[in-house]
Image: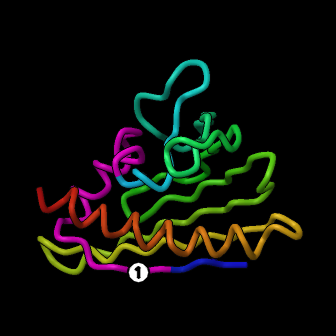
Amino acid sequence: MIVKRTTILPASRAAVFQKLQQPETLSYIAKPFAAFEPVGESVQEWTAGSTSAYRFHLFGVIPFCTHTIHIVRFAPNGVNSREENEHVPVWNHEIKLTELDDNRTEYTDRVEIMAGWKTVFIWLWAKAFYAHRQRRWVKLLGE
């Protein structure tokens, strides 16, 4: 199943891309739906080819899994990652960034989810999660 959501962010594409490179941005935009605690050495900046693992806490407190993120593409116009965990073996995430003008960027999350019989439940959570993430993006960039 696929979750797709688009919003307009109040920042240039360069500013959004700069924030995307920072793992702490994920922590900010995911809170309180999810918390990511690095396993092993933490990544300082995501780049194409990097792989990192996180203890994933549902709603910030419920231990759920170890989630692995492999960055396939990391470019100013978007990011592709292949992610997985023991509950969701396929979580393919694409972020598309389209600059509208100097102060606005169209931001799209597209996530392919495959989790067997759990897929519909994960998909429902992901729909709410990505709506929340995009609201947090707007707040982060408006600060």
Observer-nearest residue: 72 or 67?
67
Using the image, determine if residue 81 lies above or below residue 7: above
Query: What residue is shown at x 78% (from left), y 71% (from top)?
Result: 119
Query: What residue is shown at x 28% (from left), y 58% (from top)?
Result: 16
Label 1: which secondary element:
strand
The spot of residue 5 in percent (x, y) is: 47, 80
Using the image, determine if residue 48 lies above or below residue 97: above
Residue 52 in the figure: left or right of residue 98: right
The spot of residue 44 in percent (x, y) is: 41, 28
Instruction: Tally the marks.
Output: 1
Q: Does the magenta-highlighted stretch encompass residue 96?
A: no
Using the image, determine if residue 29 lies above or below residue 47: below
The quarter of the displayed image where residue 141 is located: bottom left
Assign the C terminus to one quadrant of the image: bottom left
The amino acid type of the residue labelled 1 equals: Thr
Tag 1 residue: 6
Observer-nearest residue: 48 or 86?
86
Using the image, determine if residue 38 lies above or below residue 60: above
Observer-nearest residue: 76 or 51?
51
What is the span of residues highlighted in magenta in the rendered image?
5-28
The spot of residue 96 in percent (x, y) is: 44, 70
Residue 34 in the figure: left or right of residue 116: left
Query: What residue is shown at x 24% (from left), y 72% (from top)?
Result: 9
Q: Outermost residue, front direction? A: 62
Query: What residue is shown at x 40% (from left), y 51% (from top)?
Result: 31
